[in-house]
């Protein structure tokens, strides 16, 4: 399968925008609770186990934030919204 030049551009934009949305909401999650600190302390022997049960971003509330994010970053409008929604779902699933 060989995509045309226009299709290749759209594929690359979709991947980039999906990564941007994932990292954007990952940053918001880290503002709530930096989960990596507990795991790092466990690996260094400072915690016997990582029993962290902090709060996570709500998947559905985060999905509702996507339209506002598209207004702030207009380049997100160029790609399919389902790909962006799936990025949010993948992030939420990684925490559950």
Image (spheres, rainbow, N blue to C red):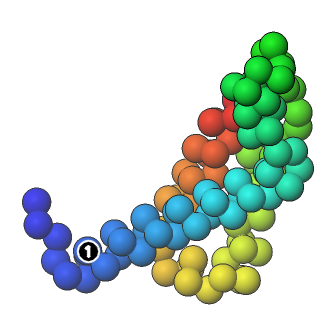
Residue under numbered circle 1? 8
The image shows residue 80, relative to residue 57, as above or below, that is below
Is residue 50 something one can see in this rendering? no
**Residue at 88% over, 37% down:** 55
The image shows residue 29, relative to residue 36, as above or below, that is below
The image shows residue 49, relative to residue 88, as above or below, that is above
The image shows residue 69, relative to residue 63, as above or below, that is below
Residue at the top extreme of this rendering: 48
Is residue 56 something one can see in this rendering? yes
Q: Quadrant of residue 48?
A: top right
Image coords of residue 72 (percent x, y): 73, 83
Tell me: 51 left or right of 2.
right
Image coords of residue 44 (percent x, y): 73, 27
Residue closest to the eye, 33 or 5: 33
Tell me: 1 left or right of 55.
left
**Residue at 79% over, 51% down:** 29
**Residue at 72% over, 74% down:** 69
């Amino acid at each position: 399968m060989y995509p045309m030049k226009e299709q290749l551009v759209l594929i690359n934009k979709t991947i980039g925008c999906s990564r941007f949305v994932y990292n954007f909401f990952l940053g918001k999650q880290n503002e709530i609770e930096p989960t990596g600190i507990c795991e790092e302390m466990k690996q260094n022997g400072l915690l016997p186990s990582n029993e962290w049960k902090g709060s996570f971003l709500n998947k559905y509330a985060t999905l509702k934030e996507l339209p506002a994010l598209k207004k702030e970053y207009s380049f997100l409008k160029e790609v399919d919204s389902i790909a962006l929604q799936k990025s949010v779902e993948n992030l939420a699933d990684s925490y559950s």
